[in-house]
Amino acid sequence: MGQLFYGNASESIEIPDRLLAHLKVLAATKLRRSESFTLTWKHVDGSASGRSTIWLQPSIPLRFVFDSAEPEKLDSNLLTEMAKSATSSAGLVVDLAEYAPAAAPAAGPASLEASAAPALAGELATAA
C-alpha cells in the first residue's frame, strides 16, 4: 500500500501502489500545466466513515511513497479515464477497494512500463 503525503501533513493517505502510480502521472501532467483538480475517495475498512476530497494545485506539495521498489505498469486506458474524470466538475473520484493490493495489475498491450510515463504525459497533454 503506497502513501500520498498532501501539503505539509505528517499523516499520509494510503493508496494502493497501482492506483498511486497512475495518480502520480496524472497529477504531474495536470499540475505542470497549472490545471488544478479535486481527488475524492471513500474511506476503506479501518478508516473513518464517509469520504474525503482534497484539492490538488501546483502550490500544494505532494509526495508519493510506494511500497514496492519496482515501478508499477501503467495502463493507458486507465490514465485516459482518470484524466477525463479529473477534468469533470466532480473531479477525480477513485475507489480504493477496487485497486486493493491482492488484485493483479493488468497485463497485455494496454500496460506500459512506468518509464514510459513522460511520453504518456505528452499524450495526455494533447488529448485534454
Image: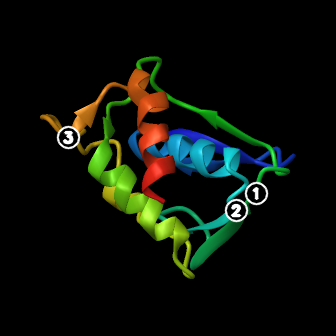
User: Of the residues shown, which amino acid type is indicated by label 2?
Assistant: Ser
User: Of the residues shown, which amino acid type is indicated by label 1?
Assistant: Gln
Rendered view: 107 above or below 11: above
Rendered view: 59 above or below 92: above
Counting other residues with Cα less than 10 Å from the Cα at mark 2, is it few (<14), some (14-19), or many (20 or more)? Answer: some
In this view, the residue in front, 26 or 66, is: 26
Residue 27 % position (x, y):
60, 48
Counting other residues with Cα less than 10 Å from the Cα at mark 1, is it few (<14), some (14-19), or many (20 or more)? Answer: some
Q: Give the labeled residue for mark 3.
A: 110
Q: CA distance from mark 2 to mark 3?
A: 27 Å
Residue 8 % position (x, y):
87, 46
Q: Are marks 2 and 1 in contact (CB under 8 Å)?
A: yes
Q: Please say which color scheme the image uses.
A: rainbow
Instruction: State the image quarter where residue 64 is shown.
Output: top right
Instruction: State the image quarter where residue 82 is shown.
Output: bottom left
Q: CA distance from mark 1 to mark 3?
A: 29 Å
Q: Which disc number belongs to residue 70? A: none
Q: Earlier in the sequence, mark 2 or mark 1?
A: 2
Q: Secondary structure at mark 1?
A: loop
Q: Give the labeled residue for mark 2.
A: 36
Q: Which disc number belongs to residue 57? A: 1
Q: CA distance from mark 2 to mark 1?
A: 4 Å
Residue 86 % position (x, y):
53, 66
In this view, the residue in front, 35 or 8, is: 35
Residue 77 % position (x, y):
28, 51
Q: Earlier in the sequence, mark 1 or mark 3?
A: 1
Residue at the spot 31% in from the left edge and 44% down from the top edge: 76
Q: Secondary structure at mark 2?
A: loop
